[in-house]
Image (cartoon, grey):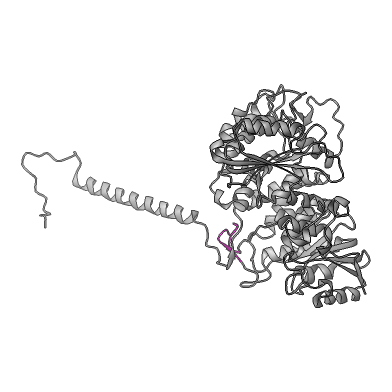
């Protein structure tokens, strides 16, 4: 243990010409300064740390969500459907994020999306509405080729939101990029599900003439009462405007079984529509879309042709 | 005759399809003006491509890519060279999966449909630097700073214009990065010939193919349903292409009306005799009315 007693060493002059009192004062001031600096640094670090978001079981907001929806809005209104060139994408982008930022991601409502809906009104020509259920890839491939048909994802809002995820938090003005509510495991009134229910409802309400729907004849529940198509779209078709719903039921080309238009779930759909005074027609393995399936399996016997 | 700029033909096709004919009276150049909100579309597409379509490209810095691109917006619209896009390309380039390259002439929409959003094939428009610029147009004003939104030069106005130089650079890079089996889709119903002897494929793609990385080249000559078969394999300009590839030492194969693509064309012409399917099709006849 060192000897703490201060003993002047012979021949050594003291460091600076300051009295002991002043030296103590300086040390105290210096010590205080260090404490203050540490406090400020800690304060800044804590202030800058993003507030903790809630943890959910679904994937978080898509990275660069805002840039993506803005770019899509401009692409859609300037290039895809230039007749919508008057739409204000800045306003639309803001209305979209305002619908869920700083809000409970499990308490989303249709009202939250009303300002966005008003800014993105769009008329789809009669006979051109194409609904779908369990045929995501096929229906959009078909709509790409038959450009006059509109799936929901071919309308401005559907185009903007397609494939993205988003949610906010009550205690924060930031998007939650870590996680968002899963429809089944967390809550059904989440920002994303409510969005799709809201836009699907309007899409169905706006439809007129003959409406088409592409269904999957190779799954167990071709017409699924829990699907958005059943819950939202079928029930929001207006019989005064829509006189016929025509279903195209496509089966997996490698496994074509019996006539799927006589499937029990299809009969159920027919019943629901007849109660609403809408005519129902059904076509098995609609030929143009059969060609689309053949692109993947050109050598299949159903695809042999005289080409 | 001036070379068919791919971008100009793209944009004029699109103009015919989508944009109502605008009275261009007084416009300085022959091409479409700068796309409105160019920066937002650019950044949005870049973000979308790297976040959604190719998550392995998540580290791409879209802001830096834009900064590299926008230098051409300050240049005289007739003095923009492919090399002006060098930094842009170096920041946005990425590998192309082997055997997935698809080159084409005169069938943009068919190629995009067939490529299935890069799932089946990866044509230039499904590569980041191709996706960003697809269907867009840009140029500075001739005698002032600021963008020209009325018109932009095409190859007929001047060779070194911003859009053509972009696609030249993009095409060269796409070729350099293509490996394995190379596919080319040509339009055998095009009256001017299926293989444009002066065009993007001829001038900016074939010369940059890496022979040591390519196994063979497959040419598909597609004929439009109900339109005349102007050229087929071994004929006219297709023969010129075949001979050129042979001379360069490439193994190649030419197929008329490659079946999967033909079937795709039939989606739109399902009742045409050329699309008659076997009776084992299992397709429904007339719709059944259910009451």
**Residue B274 percent location from the top left of the image:** 85, 50
Question: Against B121, is B188 above or below?
Answer: above
Q: Which image quarter is the N terminus of chain B in?
A: top right
Q: Which image quarter is the C terminus of chain B in?
A: bottom right
Does A221 sit left or right of B119 as displayed? right
**Residue A99 percent location from the top left of the image:** 70, 59
Identified at 49% across, 56% down, the residue is A49
Membership of A69 in magenta stretch? no
Residue A148 seen in the figure: no
**Secondary structure of the magenta portion, mostly?**
loop
Front residue of this view, candidates B74 and B229:
B229
**Residue B253 percent location from the top left of the image:** 67, 41
**Residue A221 percent location from the top left of the image:** 75, 74
Q: Which residue lies furthest to the front in this view?
A: B234
Identified at 9% across, 45% down, the residue is A8
Front residue of this view, candidates B150 and B229:
B229
Stretch in magenta? A170-180
Front residue of this view, candidates A254 and B26:
A254
């Amino acid at each position: 243990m060192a000897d703490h007693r201060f003993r002047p060493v012979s021949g050594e002059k003291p460091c600076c010409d300051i009295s002991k009192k002043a030296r103590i004062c300086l040390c105290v001031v210096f010590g205080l300064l260090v404490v203050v600096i540490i406090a400020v640094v800690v304060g800044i670090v804590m202030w800058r740390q993003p507030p903790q978001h809630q943890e959910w079981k679904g994937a978080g907001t898509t990275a660069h969500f805002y840039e993506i929806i803005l770019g899509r809005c401009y692409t859609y209104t300037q290039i895809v459907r230039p007749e919508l060139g008057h739409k204000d994408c800045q306003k639309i982008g803001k209305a979209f994020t305002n619908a869920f930022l700083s809000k409970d991601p499990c308490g989303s409502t249709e009202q939250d999306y009303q300002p966005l809906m008003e800014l993105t009104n769009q008329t789809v020509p009669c006979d051109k509405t194409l609904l779908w259920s369990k045929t995501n890839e096929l229906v959009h491939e078909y709509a790409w080729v038959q450009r006059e048909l509109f799936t929901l994802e071919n309308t401005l809002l559907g185009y903007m939101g397609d494939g993205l995820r988003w949610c906010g938090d009550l205690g924060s003005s930031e998007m939650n990029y870590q996680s968002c509510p899963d429809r089944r495991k967390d809550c059904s009134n989440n920002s994303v599900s409510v969005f799709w229910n809201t836009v699907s409802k309007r899409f169905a309400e706006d439809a007129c003439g003959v409406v088409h729907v592409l269904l999957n004849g190779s799954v167990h529940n071709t017409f699924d009462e829990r699907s958005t198509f059943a819950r939202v779209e079928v029930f929001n078709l207006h019989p005064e405007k829509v006189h016929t719903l025509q279903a195209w039921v496509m089966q997996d080309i490698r496994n074509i079984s019996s006539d799927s238009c006589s499937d029990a779930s299809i009969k159920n759909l027919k019943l629901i529509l007849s109660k609403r005074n809408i005519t129902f027609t059904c076509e098995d393995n609609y030929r143009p879309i059969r060609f689309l399936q053949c692109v993947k399996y050109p050598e299949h016997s159903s695809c042999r042709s005289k080409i | 005759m001036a070379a068919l700029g791919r971008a100009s033909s793209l944009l004029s096709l699109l103009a015919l399809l989508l944009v109502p004919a605008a009275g261009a009276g007084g416009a300085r150049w022959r091409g479409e003006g700068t796309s409105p909100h160019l920066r937002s579309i650019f950044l949005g597409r870049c973000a979308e491509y790297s976040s959604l379509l190719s998550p392995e490209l998540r580290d791409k810095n879209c802001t830096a890519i834009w900064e590299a691109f926008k230098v051409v917006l300050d240049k005289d619209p007739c003095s923009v060279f492919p090399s002006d896009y060098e930094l842009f390309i170096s920041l946005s380039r990425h590998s192309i999966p082997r055997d997935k390259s698809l080159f084409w002439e005169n069938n943009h929409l068919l190629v995009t449909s067939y490529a299935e959003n890069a799932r089946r094939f990866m044509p230039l428009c499904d590569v980041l630097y191709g996706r960003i610029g697809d269907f867009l147009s840009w140029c500075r004003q001739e005698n002032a700073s600021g963008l020209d939104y009325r018109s932009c030069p095409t190859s007929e106005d001047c060779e070194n214009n911003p859009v053509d130089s972009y696609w030249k650079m993009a095409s060269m890079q796409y070729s350099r990065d293509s490996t394995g089996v190379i596919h080319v889709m040509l339009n055998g119903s095009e009256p001017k010939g299926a293989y444009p002897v002066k065009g993007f494929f001829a001038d900016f793609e074939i010369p940059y193919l890496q022979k040591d990385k390519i196994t063979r080249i497959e040419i598909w000559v597609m004929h439009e349903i109900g339109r005349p078969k102007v050229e087929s394999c071994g004929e006219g300009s297709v023969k010129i292409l075949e001979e050129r590839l042979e001379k360069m030492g490439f193994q190649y194969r030419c197929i008329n009306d490659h079946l999967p693509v033909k079937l795709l064309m039939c989606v739109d012409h399902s009742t045409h005799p050329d699309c008659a399917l076997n009776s084992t099709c299992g397709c429904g006849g007339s719709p059944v009315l259910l009451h």
